Image (spheres, rainbow, N blue to C red):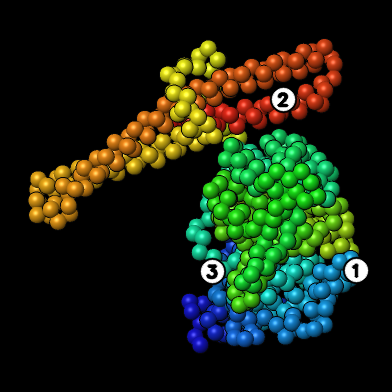
Amino acid sequence: MRPRHVTPNPVCRSGRVVGHAGYHFDARLCHNPPTWLSPTKVTSPMTNENQATFIDFDVRIFKAGDDGYTVTAQTPGSGLAEDTLDWAVLSHADFQAKLEQIREEPFTANEAFFREVGSVLFESLFRGEIRDLFLGVYQHQVLADDHTYLRLRLNVSRTAPEVATLPWELMNWNDAFLATHTRTLLTRNYLEFTIGPVQSQEVRGLPKVLVVIPRGSGLAVAEERATITQALEEKQIPYEVLGDDRVSIETLRQKLEDDTFHIVHFIGHGEFEEDAEGAMHGLLRFNATWDEPNEEEDEEWVSGERLQALLQNHPSVKLVVLNACKGAEIAERRNGRGFVGVAPSLLKARVPAVVAMQYSIRDDVALVFARAFYESLTGDLWGGHVDIATALARNACYLNFPNDRGFATPILYLRAEGGKIFDLKAETEAPARPTPPPADECQEPPKPDEAILYKYRFDSADQLALTAKAKQGNVDVIRAEIQRLERMQLENPIMAEASRADVRIPQLQAQLDETVAELDELIQVVRWKTYELCLEVAQARRELEAMKARKAELEQEGKPVPHALMGDIQRQNDELIRMQIKLDKAMSAL
């Protein structure tokens, strides 16, 4: 087959035309790289004037026949390299036994064993054209420049779930585990997910983290909570913790609706469950939504589908971290098609990045990962780069626990085009908010009847404001339809008669009157609840100022500020921000 728009490099002493991959070269015989190896320059977050170069190396695996898999690879501007996966080796009983040894509990493998398994994984995937393309890019681009980074983006078709379950994060080449190096950033993706374009990756200002810790997990949650919060506090990253009490899926829903969060870090357990039809569903353990006095039985396993339904309404969430013992594992339906793990469900909800565990992970290893991950993710050098933060955290786990599978346990699923999901270098000052007025400046509106207030007793001002906005839209639609029918009666009586305009207009008018009455009622309630919220904000502001004054007084006297007071100030400030956001939403609707 003839090559497509490719000119052979005359400096290469060996070359041939192969399929539609264009000019094939042996990287070991080329003194200069082919001209199509053109990396993409992007501004680096580094503190010096250097620029980082990221090269996307997309590897895709498709099912081809009963026992075969096609592998393609491509970099920007290159031809398409194509070969096959060595499934005979990967599916062999001896190799499968080694994988089982890694999965089994208690854990029995070691570093040499990991290198052996990782080498088999690499050699089975990077074959022929795929290997040549990888070597060419790595040797001539990555090794030639200290500021060039290769993104290995592994895309597995949903027709090949048995391939996706392999621990690709163990891949070893030249005695190096690729997933632990920032020069070979390994991420995963899923093909054939019709989830639309990925949302904007950048968050202007500082991201806010929600740490979710359901009660009774049995993990070393106190230590990991302290590690995460310390890393966040050092960089002044705002956060809240759901873990002082029971945490149900309803608790999480309410918290996400009350405030804006960019990262959700779940600490708990994950599992799979087979339903009556044989389908496997990824599950995370929350506390029960019902009142369960027995702490040992206080649990509800929430499916990935339910989490998807929740997070798809919160596009501000840019990253979910699942420190759950089987959070990243993928199950196969009996018909062999489709992924149903928790992580894929979150990707369907348009979360740009998910870090999840494909094996259970020791508490001490999880602590090392969390510390390194958040230090890098919120640091000055690579702040916001989730792919580099994951690689550095894996590396920390490997350096501290080389004989434990923990360094290869975290999987990064990335839907964003680049590895940067938010920008810590951007302007951190939020748009100016109107200063909450003193209590005596909150204008009191007419109070609705008690019966009306009782009707909306469970609804907040900002929620009712959204409902009122939607109902106003209904009013506009009904009015427009009435006007259309009335014009039809004047301009085209025959069509109006056929459309039964004389019957529909009175019906629509009655519907309009009812909707307008409901809208007026809603507006009354929104105004009153906004007034009440205004009073609460003013009171919260006074309490915060009193706490700050007490802190300033102690500092002026040279006395230590109690940790409890500092914590009260932080919590009060967080609560004031949450209340102010709700007040802004309600006032904007008025």
> Where residue 537 is drawn, which disc sits there?
none
Q: Amino acid at mark 3?
A: Glu
Classify residue 472 as left or right of residue 351.
left
Dot 3, how many residues are within 10 Å of its Cα: few (below 14), some (14-19), or many (20+)? few
Give the distance between the C-alpha atoms of the residues marked 2 and 1, in whole angstroms.
Answer: 48 Å
**The C terminus sits in image quarter:** top left
Spot occupied by residue 53 in the image (x, y as percentages of width and height): 63, 57
Q: Nearer the viewer, residue 286 or 12?
A: 286
Q: Nearer the viewer, residue 504 or 372?
A: 504
Label of residue 108 in the image: 1
Secondary structure of the residue carrying tag 1 is loop
- The label on residue 192 is 3
Estimate the x, y position of residue 370 in percent, counting from the top left.
Answer: 78, 49
The residue carrying pointer 2 sits among few (fewer than 14), some (14 to 19) or many (20 or more) residues within 10 Å by Cα, namely some
Q: Position of residue 4 (x, y in %)?
A: 48, 79
Q: Say which quarter of the image contains residue 162.
A: bottom right
Could you tell which of marks 2 and 3 lies nearer the N-terminus? 3
Q: Is residue 310 above or below residue 129?
A: above
Left or right placement of residue 501 versus residue 210 in this view: left
Residue 531 vs 307, above or below: the answer is above
Which residue is label 2 attached to?
569
How many discs appear?
Answer: 3
Residues marked 2 and 1 touching at CB (< 8 Å): no
Mark 1 / mark 3, whichever is N-terminal: 1
Q: What is the quadrant of residue 473 in the picture? A: top left
Disc 1/disc 3 C-alpha distance (Å):
37 Å
Q: Secondary structure at mark 2?
A: helix
Discs 2, 3 touching: Cβ within 8 Å: no
